[in-house]
Image (cartoon, rainbow, N blue to C red):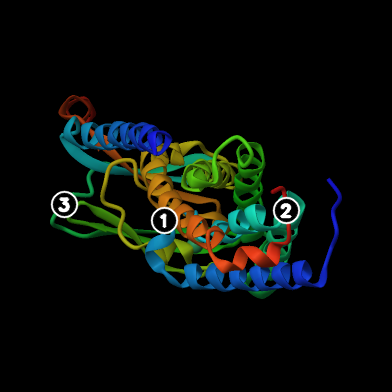
Amino acid sequence: MKKNIRWAVIFSAVVLVCLGVIFFGQLTADSKGAEIYLGGKLYKTVENIENTQPGEITVRTPEGFNRICWHNGSIWVEEADCASLTCKKYGKATLIGETIVCAPHGLVIKVVGKTDDEVDAMT
Amino acid sequence: MKKRLTVQKISLIGLLAALSLGIYALEAMIPVSNIAGIKLGLANVVTLTAMVLLGRAEAGFVLGIRILLATTFYGTFISFAFSLCGGALAYAVMCLTVNRLDKKQLWVISVLAALAHNAGQLCVAALVSGTSAMFTLTPYLVISAVGTGVLTGLTAQRLYFSPLRRFGGSHRE
Ligand SMILES: [Zn+2]
C-alpha cells in the first residue's frame, strides 16, 4: 500500500509538471502561428492562425497531397490522399506544441506560439 | 527454471494474441487516440498480462503475433514501424521491471511501459519525418501515458488476480 502511494505521488508530480509546461507555453505566447515541415525542412510558416479569415495551403509531394486549413486559432488537414489518413483523422490542432504528422508524406504541422516582439520585428 | 509448453499455455498464448489484436483494431477506430499517429498502446495490457501469467518469452510471442497480424491486416510499413518500436520498448521495460516490483504494483510497470511505448513512437515519428518538431508533444504524451498506463495496468492487475491465472501454470511461483 505504501509503495502504491509513493508511486502515485511520483506520477502525479510528473503529470503536474507536464501540465505546468503546457499551460506556461500557452500563457507566454501573444498569438499563435504554425510551422509546416516537409521532408525534414521548414516549408512554410503561417504567421497567424487566429485570423477570423480562414486560410489554406495545399502541399504537394511526389507521394501525394495534403490540403491544410486554419481558422480561429486551429489548424487541421482538410483533405489528403495518404492511405491511413491519420493526419486528417487527427482533427484540429489548437494548443501550442500540438503537432499533426502525415508520416507517408513526410509532413509535419506544428502550432507555435508567437510573441509580439517577433511579430513587430517581422513588420 | 524448466519451461514446459503445455496445451493450456499454447491456447492461452493464442487467446491473448487474438485479444490484443482485437484491442489494437478497436483502438485504431477511436479517432482521438492518435497523436501524430501515436497510439495509446491499449494492447499493451495483454502483453503485461501475458508476462505475469506465462512469462517473458510467452509475452514476447503474444506481442510478435499481434504485430505480425496487425501489419498483415491493416499494415503499412510505417504503421509497422510504429507498432514495433512502441511495442518492443514497452516490452523491454516490462521485462526489466516485472520481477523488481510487487504484483500489486503492476499498474506502475504499466505506466513505465506506456511511457516507453510513447517515447519509442515519438522517435519513429521523428525519424520518418526527419524533423524533431514533434518533440514539443512530450508533455502531452507523458500525461497520456500516465493515464492509459494506470488504466491498462489496473486491468492487467485485475486479470492477474483472477481465475485466468490457473491457466498460466505454476509460473515463477
Ligand atoms: Zn496523412
- Give a yes or no on whether discs 1 and 3 share a subunit: no
**Label located before the other in sequence (2 or 1):** 1
Task: Indicate the chain on which mark 2 is placed.
Answer: B
Q: Amino acid at mark 2?
A: His
Q: Amino acid at mark 3?
A: Asn
Which element carries disc 2, helix, strand or loop? Answer: loop
Q: Do the residues bearing badges 2 and 1 touch, measured as CB atoms within 8 Å?
A: no
Viewed as shown, does residue B9 lie left or right of A76? right
Q: Amino acid at mark 1?
A: Leu
Viewed as shown, does residue A94 lie left or right of A10? left
Of the residues tagged 1 and 3, which is closer to the observer?
1
Disc 1 crowd rating (10 Å Cα; few below 14, some 14-19, many 20+) is some
Can residue B57 be seen from the camera position used here?
A: yes
Q: Position of residue B121 (x, y in %)?
A: 55, 47
Residue drawn at (20%, 51%) of the image: A73
Cα distance in 3D space between marks 2 and 1: 25 Å
Disc 3 crowd rating (10 Å Cα; few below 14, some 14-19, many 20+) is some
Mark 2: C-beta under 8 Å from nearest atom of ligand 1:
no
Q: Position of residue B21 (x, y in %)?
A: 61, 70
- Give a yes or no on whether discs 2 and 3 share a subunit: no
Which element carries disc 3, helix, strand or loop? Answer: loop
Disc 2 crowd rating (10 Å Cα; few below 14, some 14-19, many 20+) is some
Q: Position of residue A1 (x, y in %)?
A: 39, 39
Residue for badge 1: B151
Cα distance in 3D space between marks 1 and 3: 39 Å
Q: Is residue B71 above or below residue A121?
A: below
Residue for badge 2: B171
Badge number at residue A51: 3
